Amino acid sequence: MRLNFKHEWIETNIGLMLVLTMLAISVGGLVEIAPLFFINKTVEKVEGINVRPYTPLEQRGRDIYTREGCYTCHSQMIRPFVDEKLRYGHYSLAAESQYDHPFQWGSKRTGPDLARVGGKYSNEWHVQHLIAPRSMVPESVMPNYPWLMQNLDLSDLEGRMKALRAVGVPYSLTEAEREANVEKFGAEVAAQLHIPDAKKNLVEQANLGNYDGNKAGVSEMDALVAYLQVLGTMVDFTKVNEDELVRTR
Ligand code: HEC
């Protein structure tokens, strides 16, 4: 009763109401904003973590992954629980998705988590599984994606990379940026990140990797399988020191 009385008193005192409203907003704002000052420390820099942006082919595969809505059934974030670690491997680190726009952490798992699926199966397995999941896993409820064998559209490749560059992915446009990438990632990776050569690099990786098992042309399957095969492979957990991880957080 007393509480109700005070409330009415506040609500009928416009000055006091304003002051208290401002106070509530300031505290709420501070709680939201303060963590952003420490965001740089959230991404761990420790030995064994060698995360690079996706190559043009992998990035196009990622675009297809989002286009097809794979995230509606698959997460890409291993949570720090024992059962998750036993099933999928080490829990996901912030560093692993630092170049992911949009991130694919997800919260829905009709199918298994895919954060570390890279290298788990052969390319042939993925191709067959994507075209007809039930031919590999009879009880699967995953849809068939037979149209992924169609040619990959390369017309807007550079535009897509420029958009990602605008949000902070270090794809290079100028010589200076390319040299900065050589310093950061080494010459081989830096060459893959250079936007003016994107088309050439994409076709080269697809032909070399032959992800879809068909040498002619570059299919969407080439891109998607290249993407799936790189997931979770950029961190070498045999080199990661757990104590160091905790300290940098
Ligand atoms: C309707 C839900 C659903 C959708 C949408 C879906 N999947 Fe799946 N996925 C599953 C289920 C269930 C499994 C487990 C059974 C199996 O292996 O087929 C699975 C398994 C997988 C596996 C094997 C994972 C492992 O560790 O064994 C991969 C890889 C995969 N899906 C990729 C994809 C990709 C890529 C897409 C989008 C093109 C996709 N999935 C869309 C439900 C889905």
Image (cartoon, rainbow, N blue to C red):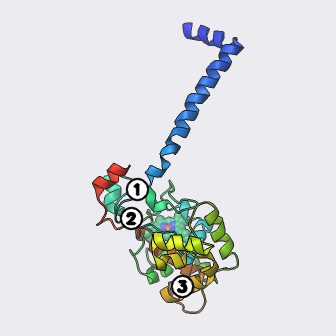
Where is mark 2, residue-wise? 49
Q: Which residue lies at the image location 55% right of the left edge and 87% below the top edge?
A: 204
Q: Position of residue 240 (x, y in %)?
A: 31, 62
Q: Label 3 sits on what residue type?
A: Ala
Mark 3 or mark 2: whose residue is earlier in sequence: 2
- CB of mark 2 within 8 Å of CB of mark 1? yes
Q: Is residue 128 left or right of residue 49?
A: right
Label 3 crowd (10 A; few <14 / some 14-19 / many >=20): many
Please provide percent x and percent y for residue 145. 58, 75
Disc 3 from disc 2: Cα separation:
26 Å
Rendered image: mark on residue 150: none
State the image coordinates of residue 76 (x, y, percent, origin top left): 47, 61
Against 6, is 245 above or below? below
Residue 243 shows in the view = yes
Q: In the image, what residue type sits under mark 1?
A: Glu
Nearer-N-terminus badge (3/1) = 1
Residue drawn at the location 54% of the way across and 59% of the way down? 103
Q: Is residue 99 above or below residue 41?
A: below
Residue 153 placement, left or right of 46: right
Residue depicted at x 44% and y 59%: 95
Give the mark toward the camera: 3 or 1.
Answer: 1
The residue identified by callout 3 is: 206
Name the quadrant of the N terminus.
Answer: top right
